[in-house]
Amino acid sequence: MSDWAFETDLAVVGSGAAGLVAALTASIDGLDALVIEKTAHYGGTTALSGGVLWVPGNARMQHPDAANDAQRALTYLEHHVGNRVGPEKLRAFVTEAPRMLNHLLRHSHLEVETFFGFPDYRPHSPGALVESRSVEPRVFAGRRLGKHLGELRSRGPIAPAGIVGTMAELRQLASARANPGQLLKAWRLLPRNLWNRAAGRKHLANGGALIARLRLSLLERQVPLWLNASLTELLVEDGRVIGLGVDVDGQQRKVRARKGVVLAAGGFERNAEMRREHLDAEPDTSYTSGSEGNTGDAIQAGMAIGAAVDLMDDAWWAPTFMPPGGAPQIVIFERAKPGNIIVDAAGQRFANEADPYNDLVKQMQEAHRAGAAAIPAHMVFDHAYRAKYPIGGMLPGITPQRHIDSGFVIRADTLDDLARQAGIDADGLAATVARFNAMAATGRDDDFHRGESAFDRFSGDPAVRPNPCLAPLDKPPFYAMKLYPGDLGTKGGLLTNEFAQVMGKGGAPLPGLYAAGNASASVMGNFYPGAGGTIGPAMTFGYIAARHAGERMT
């Protein structure tokens, strides 16, 4: 082929964490790289996320045997993933994840800190840890990006009132009204947010901080990132992927990739047709928190040249509120706080409300398939809960009238009236609340074991005893909010091996083609191991792809 508009060593499609790490790793290793992004904003779903990374054996682990964590993590993953993913790929992840993080900590602006105390999502499983595998980016002064800050994908602050804080700080803040000692642990929030407003530092936290740190590193290395640049086709010669067709602001360009192409453009959560074909349980695109550009383009481009796919019927699920006219709101720590339950239309509980978000949605789906009318479900709580904890973007004790008027929040003086307004069976709800209150008084959930696992307790309120996740619902007014089966992105995509090479339908790698992040079938199979179980592997296989393409890994 000729008439190349641009030539590089590694061409990367997608500007989330997987893509930026692939390009950054290539540059650190002395290769030329290019990143293309189909939308006007870089960062993908990562920029909208909590920004946490699950990295076994990471350099910030506060564990006496951190150096030997790879085998322990492999035991944990094998126990839950089983043979859904090849052993070589699982081993590659646990081996290379800490190397990836160390490499970036040494050679880029990435800075992380341990999310102290955060357990793996199945803390009682073989190989699990009750802390230290999850790390998160340090807060970043966004103005360091200059004009490029405005191009960063953003959905607004994760916390109410525009508070900028790490996920660890925001968790502490969530219990501050009930337990002021938690606010002391998050002491950095006040001076940082005051300074942020006074000095215009434009601080970023969470996924925005992670992407900003990677973007600054790429800017300093003069790695180009094209916005409004869509992949149109993969260019193949003699059976090898040698480049891309790209639509840049409506102009067709051919990009030659001497070492390879990395597809890291996210999943297909925004593609209604693909969802109907592969995710028949949840075809609605409304509930996803994935980036607007995630329509499966890279997956389809790979399939068009014979790539195999896997896990197309699964997603990274997360229970979600749907505020009128606003973006979906993921519901994470709020569910474990004492004084709430989640019920179906019959007023029945169907799960441990404090379960990991991926598990809870799967239980919603299972209950709904069994005829329980659990989609949407309702999160029900009382005045004591509303006074103590933030929820749905609302500060403790402050429920804007507009949310009542719109129906986003249903409020009533009695459970009977609440049930009537919410469309819940009143007798069923009354019986469920009576039973739950009796169990809460003893501190033991005999139905679903809420508050028994380390993960539950981590998300609960340490000021409440004997069970930090249980308190009665007995103080009117009562509230209900609809809970939907949202997702953080789809889990299925191009099948890859331990080197992030895309596999053909015949079982051999497609030379020159790599995939990472949600464009690839997850190394986690149908499992979600812990906080950052999406971003940690995405960055790891972006790193692996670049190193293999650069012939630094065999």
Image (cartoon, rainbow, N blue to C red):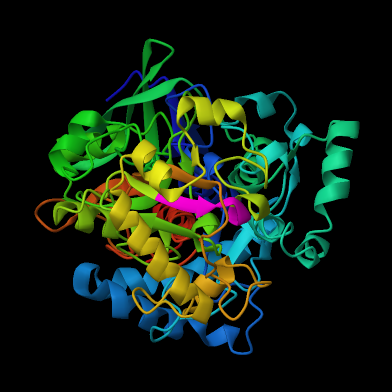
| Residue 408 percent coordinates (x, y) | 47, 33
| Residue 415 percent coordinates (x, y) | 43, 49
Closer to the camera, 79 or 550?
79
Can residue 120 be seen by looking at this rendering? no
| Residue 74 percent coordinates (x, y) | 38, 79
On-image quarter of the N terminus: top left
| Residue 362 percent coordinates (x, y) | 28, 58
**Would residue 172 be found to the left or right of residue 321 on screen?**
right
| Residue sticking out furthest to the top | 250
Which segment did they paint magenta? 379-385
For the point 32% across and 49% down, which residue is it? 426
Closer to the camera, 94 or 28?
94
**Would residue 410 be found to the left or right of residue 194 on screen?**
left
> What is the quadrant of residue 521 in the picture?
bottom left
On-image quarter of the C terminus: bottom left
For the point 34% across and 55% down, which residue is it? 429
Closer to the camera, 366 or 186?
366
Q: Is residue 482 above or below residue 37?
A: below
For the point 66% across and 80% down, which residue is it? 62
Q: Is residue 378 magenta?
A: no
Q: Is residue 384 magenta?
A: yes
**Would residue 319 be found to the left or right of residue 46 on screen?**
left
| Residue sticking out furthest to the left | 506
